[in-house]
Image: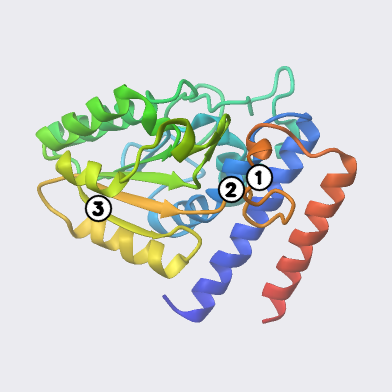
Amino acid sequence: MTSEELKQLQIMACKVRMGVIEGTHAAKCGHPGGSLSAADIFTYLYFKELTVDPLNPTWEERDRFVLSKGHTAPGLYAALAHRGFFPPEDLQKLRKIGSYLQGHPCMTETPGVDMSTGSLGQGVSTAVGMALALKYQKKQQRVYTLLGDGEIQEGQVWEAMMFASHYHLDNLCVIIDNNNLQIDGWVNEVMSPYPIDKKLEAFGFGVQTIDGHDFNQIEQALDQARQTKGKPYGIILKTIKGKGVSYMENVGSWHGKAPDDAQYEIAMNELRAQLAQLEVE
């Protein structure tokens, strides 16, 4: 990509992170840590990779995205808002009674959400079903799904992987946000999924591991996924939980709590400074 394209993606990722902080602070609850670690992949998908139409969210010819780790909805909502599916100011309605931005994605309420998720391990199965259906219909659209590394401790995930490989679903891209922290602590201490790449390979996937905060690496991996034929593709993102907010980075307690007023100001000031730096470079 060009240096200008890279800069615009970095700017948008910063705005997505600001949206995560805005939403969780307003809600006084939510999951900022994993939303921040996934902000870069959300940004790349919605601003570069996915074929979607914000003015027609249910367009039949769109690519599909399933947020299997549904608790990181604040990050998805921020990306959808800045992509034009709904106004960014509505991010402050997160988890409010009657709001269309609930704590987990709801396909019947939120424009741009292709599947209701939240029960970990189930979203990827839905994505596999979508990919198979598109194959049967001889359509060219692709399906992407994002999982957490703690989520892949669920057995249903690996049933889905086996299914995807058996049916040669090369229109499916499984992305794993490997920030190594889950609600109960370090992933490798709770129930180690490592080596993730070898497991995916054993289940018949093409696979690569990349820096999940490097847009050039994200682009290369997604290009490779598109070019791989006859089997599904897996991308493991090495990320930092809470990325972009200094006091949240690699701190497990920020998996599922919101910043208070003082913490909100610190986070937003840091992100505003990052944004200002990017805009003048």
Q: Quadrant of the N terminus?
A: bottom left
Q: Amino acid at mark 3?
A: Val
Going from N to C along the chain, the mark reached first, 3 or 2, is 3
Q: Secondary structure at mark 3?
A: strand
Q: Secondary structure at mark 1?
A: loop
Residue pushed farthest front?
A: 189
Going from N to C along the chain, the mark reached first, 3 or 1, is 3
Residue pushed farthest right?
A: 262
Q: Which mark is residue 207?
A: 3
Q: Would residue 24 appear left or right of 84 to someone viewing this image?
A: right
The Cα–Cα distance between marks 3 and 1, rounded to whole angstroms, is 28 Å
Vertical side of 60 occupied by 171: above or below: below
Q: Amino acid at mark 1?
A: Val
Q: Which mark is residue 241?
A: 2
Q: Are marks 2 and 1 in contact (CB under 8 Å)?
A: yes
Q: Would residue 225 appear left or right of 193 to someone viewing this image?
A: left
Which-is-in-front pick, marks 3 and 1?
1
Vertical side of 248 occupied by 272: above or below: below
Residue drawn at 38 percent across, 25 percent down = 121
Q: Are marks 3 and 2 in contact (CB under 8 Å)?
A: no
Residue 89 in sight in this render: no
Q: Would residue 100 appear left or right of 187 to someone viewing this image?
A: right
Residue 110 in sight in this render: yes
Label 1: few (<14), some (14–19) or many (≥20) C-alpha neighbours in 10 Å: some
